[in-house]
Image (cartoon, rainbow, N blue to C red):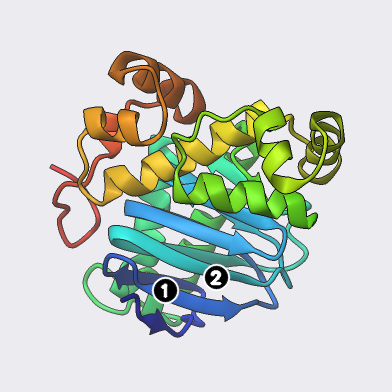
Amino acid sequence: MSKNRQPVERPASLLPLAHRERVGWHDHRHHQLVYPSHGVLQVSTDAGMWVVPPHRAVWLPAGVRHSHQAHGPTQLRTVNFTRDEPAFGGPTVLAVSPLLREVIIALTTDDAAAAEEGPAGDDGLTVRSRRNLERVALDQLRKVEELPLHLPVPADDRLRAIAAALADDPADRRTLAEFGRAAGASERTLSRLFRLQTSMTFPQWRAQVRLHHALILLASGSSVTSVAAACGYAGPSAFIEAFRQAFGTTPGRVAARPADASGHRP
């Protein structure tokens, strides 16, 4: 069973989460950058979800209700920004450059997160140093490409039935017409609804479902070959190529493996 944690209300924080551990629904008065430096994090909002590997982060604007769930042991790092920071208008998945990663880690170490006007310890950051790092982080965020990795939640009951079937079995190869016969709607109607409610075609939406499920399985320790089969790919090569195009890395680099206390992998 999964267990729930309370959100941490600090300017920057590091929260280790166990496999399937949750942070319950909440929102913030400030904007927040959410980054899993290790593990895979599912970030949910009322409009849909993202499944985020360690080289991606999510920008959550102030006031957006959200929750988190870890898949595999996960290092959840968050950095808060004031509401007047001109970043992104809605929840957005972003690439994390090597520089941005190191800045986030510096801001979210225990000493840095707890520092006041002076150093919190030998390695602590002053408020001025922290503000400088936050400006570097914002500058890096403006430079990265926004990535379309959002999985919208459709509102129509027939689409939700299809979504539930694919959540249970992402390898389900039924066509939209076949799903329509089970859901009581024509292929044309369902196709129109998918475009209207998710801004994706059905094949695009199913591809996202499979990639999100693949991230969860990889974080749980499944092999690349077994994940490819479980998610409906023709073989490991097809899966690796689809994964690389979507996430900018290979599934082998995302697969669960030990991290040190700072979230770095060997």
Residue 229's disc number = none
What residue is rendered at 40% in x and 82% in y? 5
Disc 1 crowd rating (10 Å Cα; few below 14, some 14-19, many 20+) is many
The answer to whether any part of residue 230 appears in the image is: yes
Tell me the amino acid under the disc marked 1.
Arg
Q: How many residues crowd mark 2 within 10 Å: few (<14), some (14–19), many (20+)?
A: some
Contact (CB < 8 A) between labels 1 and 2?
Answer: yes
Tell me the SS state at disc 1: strand
Residue at label 2?
67
- Residue type marked 2: Ser
Which residue in the protein does label 1 denote? 22
* Rendered residue at 73%/38% (across/down): 180
Image coordinates for residue 153, horizontal then vertical, percent: 69, 54
Across and down, in percent, residue 47 comes to: 72, 58
Q: Relative to 23, is 224 above or below?
A: above
Rendered position, 72 above or below 127: above
Which of 175 and 46 lies nearest the eye of the viewer? 175
Q: Please tell me in which quadrant of the rendered image residue 15 appears.
A: bottom left
Taking the image as shown, residue 239 lies to the left or right of residue 194, namely left
- The residue sitting at 74% across, 73% down in the picture is 63
Q: Position of residue 7 (x, y in %)?
A: 48, 81
- N-term mark: 1 or 2: 1
Which residue is located at x 71 percent, y 68 percent? 64
Between the C-alphas of marks 1 and 2, the distance is: 7 Å
- Nearer the observer, 73 or 101: 73
From the viewer's perspective, tell me whether residue 237 is left or right of residue 86: left
Whether 112 is drawn above or below 254: the answer is: below
**Residue 246 % position (x, y):** 50, 27
